Amino acid sequence: METNTCRICGSNKLMKGLKITDFGHGNVKKDLSIYIPTTDRAFFNKFERGTINAQVCGSCGNMELSIANFRELWEAYNK
C-alpha cells in the first residue's frame, strides 16, 4: 500500500498512516482492527490482532487499507 503516488489519479497528495476510528458509547475512541482467534476456548481466548491503517488521496479521495503485522495474522489464520 505505501506508495508515493495515488494509484487512481497519480497525485502525490497522499495522507499516510491514518487510523479508522469508531466513536463508541461516551465518545470513546477505538481504532478498528482485525482479529483472528488462536485458541478455541470459551473464556480467555487468545487472538492475533492487526490495526487497520489507511492512506487517502487528497486529490481524488481514493482510500487504501493495510495492516502492518500481516505475517502474524496469516500464521494465526493457518493454525
Image (tube, grey):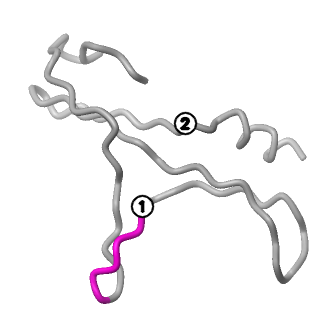
At which x and y percent is residue 62?
24, 31
Estimate how packed mark 1 is, as few (under 14), some (14 to 19) or many (20 or more) residues with alpha carbons within 10 Å: few
Q: Secondary structure at mark 2?
A: loop
Q: Which amino acid type is marked by label 2? A: Ala
Q: What's the magenta region?
A: 26-31
Kindly identify which residue carries mark 1: 31
Which residue lies at the image location 22% right of the left edge and 33% below the top edge? 15
Please tell me in which quadrant of the rendered image residue 70 appears. Answer: top right
> Mark 1: which amino acid?
Asp
Tell which residue pokes out farthest to the bottom in this image.
Answer: 26
Q: Vertical placement of 44 versus 59: above or below? A: below
Query: Does residue 18 appear to the left or right of 49 in the view shown?
Result: left
Q: Nearer the viewer, residue 9 or 33?
A: 33
Quarter assignment of residue 1? top left
CA separation in Å, label 2 and label 1: 14 Å
> Which mark is first along the chain, 1 or 2?
1
Horizontal arrangement in the rendering, residue 33 relative to residue 30 (left or right): right
Looking at the picture, does residue 13 appear above or below residue 21? above
| Residue shown at the point (64%, 55%) measured from the top left | 49
Say what secondary structure mark 1 lies in: strand
x then y, percent, for residue 29: 34, 71
Q: Is residue 17 above or below residue 9?
A: below
Relative horizontal placement of residue 13, taking residue 6 as reference (left or right):
left
Residue extending farthest to the left is 59
Residue at the spot of label 2: 68
